Amino acid sequence: MMDSTQMKHLIDVAAGRIPADLVISDCMVVDVLNGMIFRGDVAITDGLIAGVGTYQGVRNIDARGAYLIPGLIDSHVHIESSLVSPLEFARLVVPRGTTTVIADSHEIGNVCGVEGVDYMLEASMDLPLSVFHMLPSCVPSTPFEHSGAILDAETLKSRIGHPRVLGLGEMMDFVGTIEGSERILAKLMVARDAGKSIDGHAPDLSGLALNAYAASGIHTDHECSTVEELQARIRNGMYVMLREGSACHDLRNLLPGVTAANHRRCVFCTDDRQPFSILNEGHIDNHLRIAVAEGLDALTAIRMATLNAAECFHLNDRGVIAPGYRADLVLVDNLKDFQVGKVFCAGRLVAEDNEYLIEGTQKIPTSVSGRMHVADFSAAKLALRISGSKVRVIDIIEGSVVTGSGVAQVTSDSNGFFQSDTLQDIVKIAVVERHHGTGKVGLGLLRGYGIEGGAIATTIAHDSHNIIVCGDNDHDMVTAVEQLVAAGGGITMVQGGRVLASLPLPIAGLMSDLRGGPVEEHLQSMHALAREVLHIHRGLDPFMTLSFMALPVIPALKVTDMGLFDVDRFEFIPLEICEM
């Protein structure tokens, strides 16, 4: 909070009576409020913008005519999906111009419960990057899988008052919301009673069902994939988050729906973005490049990445370049390529020429380390007996987390057990419960992955993050699971009983304790092995694709530790199709 002495100092600097702490001079200032660009100096003191005009400062940085834009805001992100800690996530995204993120700790919440939420709050404190949080609303996301914890309304209430908690995260249980489930209503009221926002997650929802969802207080949705869905949500009073992640690429599909009339209800988000995407393509700066390349006015795109996002989440201290606002600022070379030169967080130069300038240390508390409680697991749990030949298969759809619900004719061995069919590209997939030692293993068949001669397993398996493993033989699948248990979580590949490569993820089996660069280098070498040795199709991300095969809130067919799940019918179904 600012006292009167600090206020007087700010006013004196703004009036030009005393020098500013820092002046960024000769910059093309992007005014998102008027939709204009003008040349001037920006004076900064005590982390705030004092004024825009002609100023003198204790320090001066000559922008040499570069464009100065407000710091970029990611409106919805799961930091865990970057595979690194919050500290290292900041190291990745701040040099790309992102100064604020709205994080949903849904992933670690599913593994560690409130301890995971507390870790993310603590680990993201005192970073140059401003990290605000939405409390995970659906842990577990459905009752059709075993997660590591249950976050009920009372638990959420205990954290909703935290100053960096802005509300309730994506409400994936749209069925429970629409039906007015008492359990869901209790969670919604936690946010509403605290005067805080509620994020949405409602793919394909329309008509009266969408009306009911919006009436419950849902404020945003990042699951739009068509212009019609975007328009319907805005019509229902919601903000639309245009997503461009590592797995989901909705931005180009949605941009034709952004108009002069509705763009103020549009913001950008990444949702899930891995190190490769950030290091090679960018973060929200990538959204800006895509938007402008697709024909959107640059000032409109910048407004969506700054002012709109700030207003969406009631962050009234940022998002514009004006007196009294937080000095989160980014210098870019032009408004087409958006190559970032310098990044300022609260008036402090924190990144320059893609280099993060701030050092920091981290520790992994025991409350979120390991989290591998697998019991009663053996090759027998993977045995899949088939009495007939007609089965349901999960069909991979390249470039999407949506899957198809397919049918195939398969063969079994002399004992009646399923045999992998490389000609049809059909292999076994399993989810092994890892949180409570239940011994549960769900089995399914996957088509379109390409794996031959081995197995891949990971503890990143949305949303409950059990172990998911896929392979063309049980022996390698068992070895892969056992290796992950011994390592405390991660990603591994096995061939002929030998571990080809592994990436340990000691933070809840979701995040590495290494820097983003080394994680990315290791992942890329693993990607190459997955394609060249295990023959995973080149159009797929070998590990991210696998991780979404356990997501029981995205159509159409998925597998959890409890069995094969039909998302459209919202019920378990048998793998075999019985013919009368």
Image: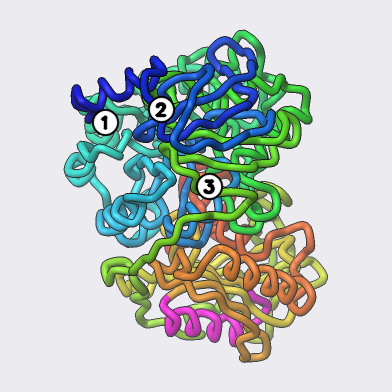
The rendered magenta stretch, by its main secondary structure, is classed as: helix
Determine whether 340 is above or below 467 in the image. Answer: above
Q: Which amino acid type corresponds to the residue marked 2 in the rendered image? A: Pro
How far across and down, in percent of the image, does residue 41 sit?
55, 24
On whether residue 54 falls in the magenta region, the answer is no
Near-viewer residue (546 or 443):
546
Tag in front: 1 or 3: 3
- Residue denoted by label 3: 94
Tag in front: 2 or 3: 2
How far across and down, in percent of the image, does residue 327 sit?
44, 32
- Residue denoted by label 2: 19
- Residue denoted by label 1: 191
The local crowd at label 1, few if under 14, some if 14 to 19, many if 20 or more residues have their Cα within 10 Å, is: many
Q: Which residues are magenta?
A: 471-488
How far across and down, in percent of the image, does residue 379 sit?
51, 85
Determine whether 330 is above or below 408 in the image. Answer: above
Q: Is residue 499 left or right of residue 53?
A: right
Tag in front: 1 or 2: 2
Q: Quadrant of residue 199?
A: top left
